[in-house]
Image: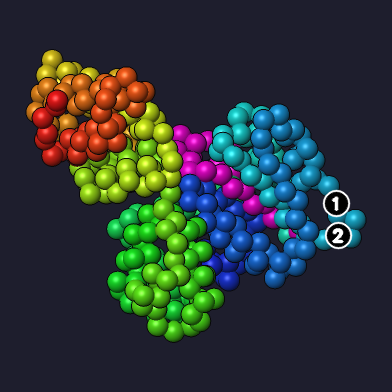
Amino acid sequence: MKIPANQLNASLKKSLLPCYLVTGDEPLLVQEALDAVRAEARQCGFASRELYVAGSGFDWQELVAAGGNLSLFAEKRIIELRLPSGKPGKAGGSAIIELLQQTAADLLVLISAPKLDKSSLATRWVKAVAASGGALVQIWPIGLRDLPAWITTRMQNAGLQPEQDAVRMIADRVEGNLLAAQQEIEKLRLISGAGPVSVADVDNAVADSSRFDVYKLVDAAVAGDAARALKVLGSVRNEGTEVVIVMWALTRELRTLARLGDDIRSGVELSTALQNAGVWRNRQGLVRTCISRHRPGQFYRLLKMAKQGDAAAKGQLAADPWQIATDIVVGISGVHIRAA
């Protein structure tokens, strides 16, 4: 069975299942789901926990044997398995199935993994979770649009009564980093105590916990969000990132965009061109809209600027590479500028 993440606590109160598979790429929410299962298990008498991390060279037979081992004091046990890659392979899949066949009233299996794709969800070991009477709990990321509501709920649960602008300030500063958001909420609770929270309270207490990198920079520009792209660029610069790395990322993206433009003009279907270029499925929508915003040849003009920026970054051209990077970011976003 599948249990929505926001219904996990209610489900646990009704009954504790013999197995849970928690998957997702949001560390805070995955950890909280695992904590909720462990807490309920402790309430039900599961006093012993054995942790296995299936890294390179992991002995899957050790996991199978753990399921069959009897506790010296007949304790209820939790066997927790972490799958860092989400892909246990044939041997691992078979071992997990065998372990799940051993679940009983005194044995609970808790498995965690990154987000599983469609093909992984269809594997025998994942299906065995449901067959053993267990549940799949899929953790979905909180988008930037939903982040303010998420923060508001968290603050209210902590006894805080935030102003709307205070919530927006936190959301803007943490830039989707849920762990940072939770830490700032806890900091506010400790500093101010329960009650109203104003913009001034947040400004005084919240550090800028944004985690920007060159990939977010590129995605913001490709998405056409010039304001956010420039903000990310400024943060990347302030964090000490070498401008050569920024130019590398922009150049790589521009080469892909220019090649896609050439394919489309030659009659290749865009979906085919995207697949041939190796554009990830979750980025294809961004890339499509970016191409639609630009006229033929504009990506090549931006590539010429990127070449100049790279030369300036390496001291081979008397120019400001950060200014060139700014012009390129604005150009990719859709504000057309003239190359030097």
Left or right of 69, for residue 86:
left
Nearer to me, 24 or 169: 169
| Quarter of the figure with residue 144 | bottom left
Report if the CB atoms under discs 1 and 2 are less than 8 Å apart: yes
Residue drawn at point x = 68 percent, y = 41 percent? 53
Which residue reaches farthest front?
A: 318
Q: Amino acid at mark 1?
A: Leu
Residue drawn at point x = 48 percent, y = 51 percent? 26
Nearer to me, 35 or 69: 35
Left or right of 63, for residue 93:
left
Left or right of 12, for residue 204:
left
The span picked out in magenta is 106-128
Left or right of 265, for residue 55:
right
Residue drawn at point x = 64 percent, y = 44 percent? 82
Crowd band around label 2 with a 10 angstrom C-alpha radius: few (<14), some (14–19), many (20+): few
| Quarter of the figure with residue 88 | top right
Residue 180: in sight, yes or no?
yes
Q: Which mark is residue 74?
A: 2
Residue at which label 1 appears: 70
Residue 143: x, y in percent? Answer: 35, 54
Residue 225: x, y in percent? Answer: 22, 46
Residue 284: x, y in percent? Answer: 27, 34
Nearer to me, 152 or 270: 152
Circle 1: element type: loop
Say whether residue 108 is magenta: yes
